[in-house]
Amino acid sequence: MLQKVIVYTALDERDRNLIKTGVQLSVHFGKELCLFHQVSKGYQKENTDEKLKKYQQILHRDYPNLPVTLLVASFLRGKLAAHLADDHEAIIIIAGASEFKRLAVPLQNSPIPFLFVNEQMDSAPDFGKIVFPVDLRRQNRDVLKWILYFGKFYQSEIIAIGANDKQESNRQLVAGHLSALKNMLTRYKVTHKIYRGTLNSLRVHHEGFEAAEQLHAGMLVLLGSSFITLLDLLIGLPEEKIVKKADHFAVLVINPKRETYLVCE
């Protein structure tokens, strides 16, 4: 079974940019594109299947060498991403930014990243430049796998911004992550720049967002929330707020609570 780039479809106009993004990633990564629609009981099977097949026909016409499959399922919300990864060889899920709240629980249990794309963008994101804010958490090492993947297969330029913590032990953790990133990208000849930021580990994602806007980046990479408080549930997760504000670039969110699955090259 081929590994798949999954597009989480809504079966309306919002899908257009998501599918374009899915095509880009599938072609560059050499993976199968899978158009997925999550359903509930009592859904209209004929209408759903007809819309997905129409998408598939258009893609077969425009990209005859790209394998495109369809999947309609009713997964339990918390296990959605795990089912897609374990049972259907998904490596990444592309979803609309407007779907973040609906997908927050699947993301918190996911072994694969979610790529959130603003459905209102004029075109699919250009992944030529990627911004990665680095905090002190050890799970940043899992994110490096995806940073390298884009660098190798998309020839992306990586801009990393390290948190500027006051405590020396925290500074050393951040420095270790940045050193590992630099060594890896240098080894594989991936273009990169690494900066020390001005904000600490709790706020460096804000600095990353601002950098992505100023540099006209195509993607911001975030390590998701490790702990979710009642306040987060009331006012929204930090990554949710960033996804909602990201009008001109995509946001790749990686779950820190599970080890990220490797991508077969």
Image (cartoon, grey):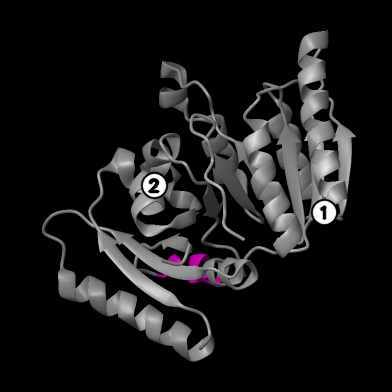
* Residue 182 x, y percent position in the rendering: 85, 40
Residue 200 lies, with reference to residue 114, above or below; the image says: above
Residue 136 lies, with reference to residue 249, above or below; the image says: above
Write down the residue under mark 2. Answer: 81
Mark 1 and mark 2: Cα distance apart in space: 30 Å
The front one of 226 and 1 is 1
* Residue 48 x, y percent position in the rendering: 24, 71
Magenta span has 258? no
The front one of 160 and 262 is 262
Quadrant of the frame with the C terminus: bottom right
Q: Provide the secondary structure element on which disc 1 rests.
A: loop
Answer few, some or many: residues within 10 Å of disc 1's Cα (few below 14, many 20 plus, some between 14 and 19).
few
* Mark 1 vs 2, N-terminal side: 2
Is 74 on the left or on the right of 131, as rendered?
left
User: Which residue is the extreme one toward the left?
Assistant: 42
Write down the residue under mark 1. Answer: 188
Magenta span has 17? yes
Q: Amino acid at mark 1?
A: Tyr
Q: Amino acid at mark 2?
A: Ala
Answer few, some or many: residues within 10 Å of disc 2's Cα (few below 14, many 20 plus, some between 14 and 19).
many
What residue span does the magenta drawing correspond to?
Answer: 13-20
